[in-house]
Amino acid sequence: MTKTIGWNLDNSYQRLPGFFYSRVSPTAVKAPIIIKLNESLAKEIGLNIEELRQNPEIFAGNQLPNGSIPIAQAYAGHQFANFTMLGDGRAVLLGEQITPAKKRVDIQLKGSGKTPYSRGGDGRAALGPMLREYIMSEAMHSLKIPTNRSLAVATTGESVQREVDFPGAVVTRVAASHLRVGTFQYARQWGTKEDLQALADYAIDRHFPDVKEDDNKYLSLLKEVSKRQADLIAKWQLVGFIHGVMNTDNMTISGETIDYGPCAFLNTYDKSTVFSSIDIRGRYAYGNQPDIGGWNLARFAEAILILINEDEQKALPLAKEVIEQYVTLYDQNYLNGMCTKLGIFNQQADDEVLIRRLLDLMEQHKADFTNTFRSLTLDQFDEEVRLFQSKAFTKWYQQWQDRLKEQTESKEQVQQLMREHNPSIIPRNHRVEEAIEAAVSEGNYHVMDQLLSVLSNPYAYTLDQEAYSKVPPDSDENYQTFCGT
C-alpha cells in the first residue's frame, strides 16, 4: 500500500554498531486521523500528497512505510549541566528518505510509544505540544533559520495522562539527521574508540564530506560543527528566539534547530528573559544562548579529543583554538546580521557601538524587539511607544541616518535590505497559545491555519500581518512554557 506514496527509504544509521540504537516498533493507536499535513514539505521530499491523506496509519505508527526498519536512537546529554544517559524515549526513526534532489533526511515519529530508553515514561505525547512543534518549526523555516520540520500531526483517538487527560497525538519530524552532541558523548562514555570513530566517520560522510581527505578530518569536523553552531545561534539572537532547553542532547551536529519544547520568542527586549518553567536559574536565558552554544561545543570537543590525537594532551590545544574561534565566528555573524537589520551594507569600526547603543535603549525603555526593527524598516514610529519619544532615541536615530548617508546605496536599497532581514511578524507567544487552545479544546484548526498562513512569509509586510504584529497587553510578563514535546 505504501509503495505508491513515494517512499524511498534507506537505513544507513543502522550500519553503525548496534550499540547506537535499539530496534523497536511504534505502538499502534486506536483511531489515527491526520489533522495537519505539510503539503509543500511532502512534495519536496518526494511524497504523494493524496496517497498520504489516505494513509493516516503511517503518521501514527500503525503502519510502516515501505523500506522502514524502525529504531530508537541512543544518546546521552548534559541536562542543565548534569550528565546522564538518555535516548529516544518516545520517538522512533522510521528511516532516511532519499529525496528527488538526492538529499538524505530522517523521518521520525514523535509520541509513538515506549522504547527501551523511555525511563518509566509512557512514550506518548499530547496534541498541544505536537502542534507547538509544527507551528514553531515551520515559522523558523520561514524565517530562514536551519531547523527540523514537521511533515504531519496525527491524533491517536486516545488520551494521554499528564496533569489531566489530553488528546494524544504523534508528530512526524523531518531532519537533516538526529546526530547530537549527546550522541558523541554517549559513544565516548560507554563505547569503544572504534564506536566513536565509526560515528564520527558517519557524521562526516553525511554532513561534511568535503573534509574526508583533510590531514586531520576529526579536527575539521569540530571546526565545521563550530561554524554551524555559530551561524545558527546568531540567527536565533537576531530574531529573538529562545530555545529554552539547550542541553547537549538538543544540539545537532548538522546545525539545525531541534526539539521545540519550552521555546518562545522575545517580546520586550531583555537579555535575561526566560520562559521555560524548568529553567529556574536562567541558564538558558536569551542572553546566555551564545555562551551556552560554546559550552556545548566544548563538550563535543571533549568527546572527540581522542580522535583528533591519540595523545589527548596534544589534541587539547587544537580543540581549544577551535572553541575560541567559535566566539569570533558568532560575534561576526551577529554583527553582520545586525548591520543588515539596520540597512548597513559596508561595515565600519563604529557600527558595533551604534548597534549596542540601540539595544541598550531598547532594554532601558522595555521596547518590543521585533517591532522596534519593524518600525525602523518602515520608518514609522508609534507615538505611544516610550522608546520613540525619548530624546536619546532621537539622537541615536540621527546618528543612524548620518551613518546611512555615508553609503552609496539608495534609500530604497537600504529599506529593501532591512525588509529582507527584519521580519514583520514572529509567532507571538499569545498567538501560538490561542491557536493551540482552539485546536485542543474546540477542535478548531482555523485559528492555527490562519497563523501558519501569515507566518509563511514573515518578511512580506502585508496588510494581513498587521494584526499579528501587535504586542499583547501584558507583554508576556508572566508567560511560561513547558517541556511538553
Image (cartoon, rainbow, N blue to C red):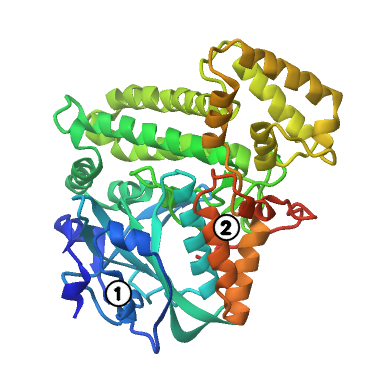
* Residue type pointed to by label 1: Glu
Residue 413: percent from left, percent from top: 53, 24
For marks 2 and 1, give the CA distance. Answer: 33 Å
State the quadrant of the N terminus: bottom left
Residue 263: percent from left, percent from top: 56, 54
Q: Is residue 308 left or right of residue 430?
A: left
Which is closer to the viewer, label 2 or label 1?
Answer: 1
Q: Is residue 124 left or right of residue 274?
A: left
**Residue depicted at 38% across the width and 36% down the height:** 228
Could you say whether the residue bearing mark 2 is in a helix, strand or loop?
loop
Q: Is residue 348 left or right of residue 433?
A: left
Badge 1 crowding class, 10 Å Cα cut-off, few under 14, some 14 to 19, many 20 or more, is few
Q: Which residue is mark 1?
A: 50
**Residue depicted at 57% across the width and 75% down the height:** 439
The tag on residue 262 is 2
Badge 2 crowding class, 10 Å Cα cut-off, few under 14, some 14 to 19, many 20 or more, is many
Q: Quadrant of residue 19?
A: bottom left
Q: Is residue 192 above or below residue 420?
A: below
